[in-house]
Amino acid sequence: FDRRIFNFAAGPATLPEEVLKQAADEMLNWRGLGTSVMEISHRSKEFMEVYEEVVQDLRTLMNIPSNYEVLLLQGGGLGQNAAIPMNLMPLAKNGPKADYIVTGIWSEKSYKEAQKYGTANLAASSAAEKFNTIPPRNTWKLSNDAAYVLYCANETIGGVEFPDVPDVGNTPLVADISSNFLSKEMDVTQCGVWFGGIQKNIGPSGVTIVLVRKDLIGHHMGITPLIWDWSVQASTQSMINTPPTFSIYMAGLGFKWLLKQGGVKVIEKRNQEKAGLLYQFLDQSSLYENRVEKQYRSRMNVTFFLKDESLNAQFLAQSNAAGLVALRGHKAAGGMRASIYNAMPIEGVKALIEFMRDFERRA
Ligand code: PMP
């Protein structure tokens, strides 16, 4: 390609061109220091300023109350799948225990990982429905002695998203927001913990953000690795060891970009519009179909199938040649998937629809 393409990858994913340009411009000489940001000490005054601004901008964007800690960690969402039970399960009254809501591959992974640290109770699952829906809240079998309830707010592979934060009473709720972080307004007080990597809606891979209510910190198991001990990380500005400085800097550029767009409220409208156009097109098509129950369709990961699957290879080759890349669905789900995170412009979605319409006409 001799130009930037429309990249529908699920993560790492497309970034705003302005962000990439700024990073490129500053690469050799950042803030007149004669070096790039990635070559200086994480403990330097200059980097600490970046770090503090990153945390402050995130607090502004998500309206994070002061009784929540913002941690910038490593190890990804998968790391937190282990860190969460280790940090929280001891809060349970009758031995380490937590409830899990399984609505797709990612929450299933969380549920399986938790079993290593205590009792993970499968409170609800949509596996029998091929993860195309969310089990109705009144069917969930929550325990009365669980330390927390974990759910995945957006299942990246199946393309299933909770329209609202579920009500689980007084038990702290833990939300995996890896793939819908900052894509829509979220009331932070509704969950005890929110976690996810930055590599979909914010920046490159390398940083896992954990927002945790302060009273949930300090109850960890003795075996908890230092780097995932939330109390240690909270008291050292997430710098018990060398943090991923360049990714933190890139997250900062991503936050500034989002603030410039008008913040989460504005991006939410755009995301709604982008997903709306795509689903509307899929619903009227006789070649393509989305299989997710309508009210739970993801605004971030639009999954679809060609009713004639023998056309899959052709579809992928031709879309790729047209500069619409990474549309192949996850191997666990098959079919296609267009990930349309914050940085995907509406022009990209329109170009995809035009291509799909044309492909259907020729099929
Ligand atoms: N949860 C969800 C919903 C995800 O989409 C992903 C990554 N695709 C993960 C967890 C795992 O995150 P990571 O790759 O950062 O470990």
Image (cartoon, rainbow, N blue to C red):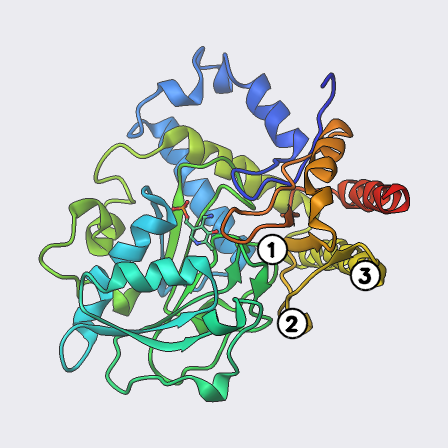
Asked whether 240 or 325 is in front, the reply is 325
Above or below for 239 versus 300: above
> Mark 1 CB in 8 Å range of ligand 1?
no
At label 1, which amino acid type do we have?
A: Ser
Q: Can you say which quadrant of the picture contains the C terminus?
A: top right
Given the current orientation, which residue lies at the most extreme front position? Answer: 310
Label 1 sits on a secondary structure element that is: loop
Number of marks drawn? 3
Residue wearing tag 2 = 293
Mark 3 crowd level (few <14, some 14–19, many ≥20, 10 Å Cα):
few
Residue 205 horizontal/vertical position (percent): 45, 37
Mark on residue 280?
3
Q: In the image, which is nearer the foreground, mark 3 or mark 1?
A: 3
Q: Between disc 2 and disc 3, whose residue precedes? A: 3
Image point (84%, 58%), residue name: 285
How far apart are the two marked residues, 3 and 1, measured between alpha carbons? Answer: 20 Å
Mark number displayed over residue 209: none
Q: Is residue 267 visible?
A: no
Q: Which of disc 2 and disc 1 is earlier in sequence?
A: 1
Would you identify the image quadrant in which residue 345 lies? top right
**Residue ID at (74%, 39%):** 315
| Residue in the foreground of this view, choosing between 213 and 115 | 115
Name the residue tied to disc 1.
183
Task: Choose mark 1 or mark 2, whichever is in front.
Answer: 2
Q: Secondary structure at mark 3?
A: helix
Q: For mark 2, give the secondary structure.
A: loop
Disc 2 marks a residue whose amino acid type is Glu
Is 96 placed above or below 78 here?
Answer: below
* 254 to 340, vertically: above or below: above
Amino acid type at circle 3 is Gln
